[in-house]
Amino acid sequence: MKKLWLLCSLALILIVPLYFVIGCGTANKTTTTTVTATTTSATSTTLHGTTNYYGSQSPGDWWSWTLGNSTFVGTNETSGYYYSGTFTDLPTGFKKATITASDDPSLSGFLPHDAYVLEYPNVAMLVKPAGSDDNVIVCAAKATTTPSSGYFNYINLPYQGWDESTYAAYGTTEVVRDAGGLYDFSNRAYNISKAQCYSSQEVDYVLSDGKLSKTGSDLQVFLTPSGAFMGDSGPGQGGFAGAQKETLSITDIVTREYNGFMFEYDTTTGAGTSTPVGGEPHPTTANAIKGFAYASLETGTREAGVDAELVLTSQDSNGVYHGTMDTGSYNYTLHAVIARVSGKILLFAIAKAAGNDNPMNFLVIEK
């Protein structure tokens, strides 16, 4: 949540840079461009009407998106640049988004350009940006009805300077809608070692245009009535991805198939790598998902020898799952928010390994 929500008090100790779908807020515009996506004659195999999303991208840029039948418009609201074009559905379940227009000067001479999207319509969306600086964008659908009070869990999307002992990795939030229609958030944050390192409260947030915000605060919360819980903490302060608190059996979770992205973030340089991944029941290890990397989202071929073993060992009283992730090179401590939202499981995790300074986000949605 907000950076003060992320800071683990030291007294307590103890996922050519092109800015598509990148725009890390390095250069801000002073004008606003409005682009409307059309919803005419779709070429995609799965048709849907216009859908709107809000999202967060490390190190703390927030985005708005409109998807039509075969068109998209994405705006980095932090930098002010827009990116629009068309998309087609791929056999893997992802979409290929071809950028054909943008007012971002860094894209001059580089259009058209492709990025990749995983959409769970009207719930959530994950975007792998174009270019080398491809910090994943994690989105929730714009709220079209009033979200209710409840308990929600989240994992953090790291930002430059994030440290496993100083900053929180995950947290739990009670959301209360008061009699006047304002929203309050009571938050508890935990570090990679599962120690509570901060508690805080945010009050009097207003639901406007499908998101929760407050004048004078950088924190924006994207809370859907279906139970997705995302947000952006402001420039340089990261974001978060989560869902309603829910208890699912580990057996139920690990017997599903998933698609999504593995996001590795360099907290020193601020550069990240988003790798398209899938998950399936592990053939030999109990309570485990076998993760794999896609070599091509166009054909579905897999990277040879690039596998991970994600083992879930427990769920705590707050509803957060804990376990490990073994990539062969490192054995990570892992914390995950897992919930069934509108019929499909969302699995959002943060992981950190001794010997590797870069945290990982494992962000997948049930097929």
Image: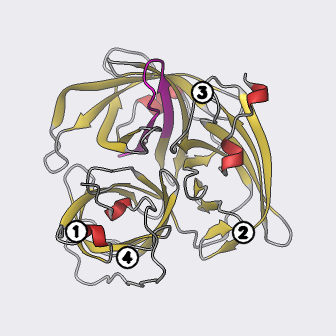
Amino acid type at mark 4? Gly
Q: Which mark is residue 49?
A: 4
The reply, left or right, for residue 8 in relation to residue 117 is right
Mark 4 surroundings within 10 Å by alpha-carbon count, few (fewer than 14), some (14 through 19), many (20 or more): some
Q: Earlier in the sequence, mark 1 or mark 2?
A: 1
Residue 71 in sight from this viewpoint: no
- Determine the secondary structure under disc 2: loop
Amino acid type at mark 2? Lys
Q: Determine the CA span between mark 2 and mark 3.
A: 29 Å
Query: Magenta part mainly helix, strand or loop?
Result: strand
Amino acid type at mark 3? Ile
Q: Determine the CA span between mark 1 and mark 2.
A: 38 Å
Q: Earlier in the sequence, mark 2 or mark 3?
A: 3
Q: Which residue is mark 1?
A: 44
Q: Earlier in the sequence, mark 4 or mark 2?
A: 4
Amino acid type at mark 1? Ser
In front: label 1 or label 2: 2
Picture coordinates of residue 314, whole percent (x, y): 59, 22
Picture coordinates of residue 223, whole percent (x, y): 61, 60
Q: Which mark is residue 161?
A: none
Q: Which residue is mark 3?
A: 192
Q: Determine the CA span between mark 1 and mark 3.
A: 41 Å
Q: Which residues are magenta?
A: 348-367
Q: Earlier in the sequence, mark 1 or mark 3?
A: 1
Residue at 49 percent of width and 30 percent of height: 351
